[in-house]
Amino acid sequence: MTASGERFNPSAMTAAHKSLPLGSRVRVTNPASGDSVTVRINDRGPYVGGRCLDLSRAAFAAIGDTGRGVMSVKYEVLAT
């Protein structure tokens, strides 16, 4: 279960953030490729130093290689 109360779906375009309101929409961009995806914040985290977002598998795959596990991104809050 996520902090929003919904079941985690790795195929959904969602993400976790420590402080943005649940339901916020965020555009996440991979600066290396220019690819971007819009996600909905539905969970809290990540709780690893130096990380700001935890993307679902589908959101990560839309902008990068999931085999890398971690990538640098830029993000812009579209709606809270």
Image: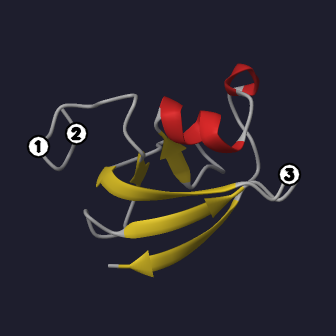
Which of these two is toward me, 46 or 40? 40
Within 10 angstroms of label 3, few (less than 14), some, or many (20 or more) residues?
Answer: few
Q: Residue at x 35, y 57 (%)?
A: 41
Q: CA distance from mark 1 to mark 2?
A: 5 Å
Which tag, 3 or 1, sits closer to the chain's start?
1
In the picture of the structure, the residue carrying the numbered disc 3 is 33
Q: Residue at x 44, y 56 (%)?
A: 39
Which callout, 3 or 1, points to the residue nearer the camera? 3
Which image quadrant for residue 6? top left
Within 10 angstroms of label 2, few (less than 14), some, or many (20 or more) residues?
Answer: few
Which image quadrant for residue 1? top left
In the picture of the structure, the residue carrying the numbered disc 1 is 5
Q: CB under 8 Å between callouts 1 and 2? A: yes
Q: CA distance from mark 3 to mark 1?
A: 33 Å
- Indicate which disc residue 2 carries: 2
The disc labelled 3 sits on which kind of residue? Ser
